[in-house]
């Protein structure tokens, strides 16, 4: 009898979670180690998966993407609760935590895989992305024009396991110390009110 009550409670909780209208956002903002680390700490984000989108090769490897033979960008696919964090807030974080004005590069990371891209999952996401870019340009947040491509989402290929939660597992690695950590510091300072507890 007790076991069936626990099973019923478990199934009820599972159904509530599955009934939630979570949304997905797929964003390319340079190295996915940086982008993943940022969104893992944003309140309302349920899951963040690094991977590849925007290319023409099925199931690309990291090595192939870095060789620029697949057309993919390094991206993160974010599952979020729109009742807690809106898509426009997701994009605000995106545009503040990377440089959307440099074509095919972020700092010393150069190549088409590092391009700035929003892969929209709906017409509403497309409209929001275009509006956010327009507002950033009107407010002259950046001196240069934003070159972020707003493209319809097609496919997402998860990255290899060793990329998942990379910053948290490799904080002493050089790239993490000199590139990811400063981005995280900036993000935490600007968005301190929106961080997970």
Image: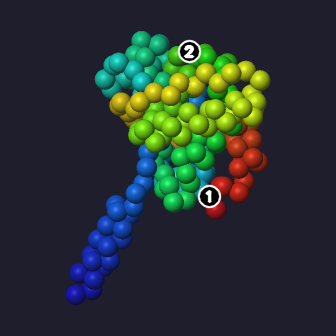
Residue 28 percent across, percent down from the top left: 53, 30
Report the Cα–Cα distance between label 2 and label 1: 33 Å
Task: Determine which residue is flagged by label 2.
Answer: 111
The single residue placed furthest to the bottom in the displayed view is: 1
Residue ID at (48%, 36%): 126
**Residue 103 on image: x %, y %:** 61, 17
- At x 68%, y 21%, the residue is 145
- Is residue 184 shown to the viewer in this render? yes
Front residue (pair 172, 161): 161
Crowd band around label 2 with a 10 angstrom C-alpha radius: few (<14), some (14–19), many (20+): some
Residue 3 location (% of width, % of height): 25, 81
Q: Residue at x 52, y 16 (%)?
A: 112
Q: Is residue 175 visible?
A: no
For disc 1, the marked residue is 196
SS assignment at label 2: loop
Image quarter of residue 196: bottom right
For the residues bearing labels 2 and 1, Cβ distance under 8 angstroms: no
| Image quadrant occupied by the C terminus | bottom right
Front residue (pair 135, 1):
135
């Amino acid at each position: 009898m007790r076991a069936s009550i626990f099973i019923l409670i478990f199934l009820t909780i599972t159904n509530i979670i599955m009934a939630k209208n979570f949304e997905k956002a797929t964003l390319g903002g340079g190295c996915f180690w940086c982008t993943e680390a940022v969104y893992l700490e944003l309140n309302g984000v349920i899951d963040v998966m690094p991977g590849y989108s925007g290319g023409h090769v099925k199931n690309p490897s990291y090595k192939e993407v870095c060789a620029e033979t697949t057309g993919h960008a390094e991206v993160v696919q974010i599952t979020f609760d729109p009742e807690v964090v809106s898509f426009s807030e997701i994009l605000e974080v995106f545009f503040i935590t990377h440089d959307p004005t440099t074509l095919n590069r972020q700092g010393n990371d150069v190549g088409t895989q590092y391009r700035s891209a929003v892969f929209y999952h709906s017409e509403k996401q497309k409209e929001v992305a275009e509006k956010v870019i327009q507002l950033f340009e009107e407010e002259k947040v950046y001196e240069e024009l934003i070159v972020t491509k707003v493209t319809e989402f097609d496919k997402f290929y998860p990255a290899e396991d060793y990329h998942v939660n990379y910053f948290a597992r490799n904080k002493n690695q050089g790239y993490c110390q000199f590139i990811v950590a400063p981005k995280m510091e900036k993000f935490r300072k600007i968005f301190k009110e929106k961080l997970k507890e």
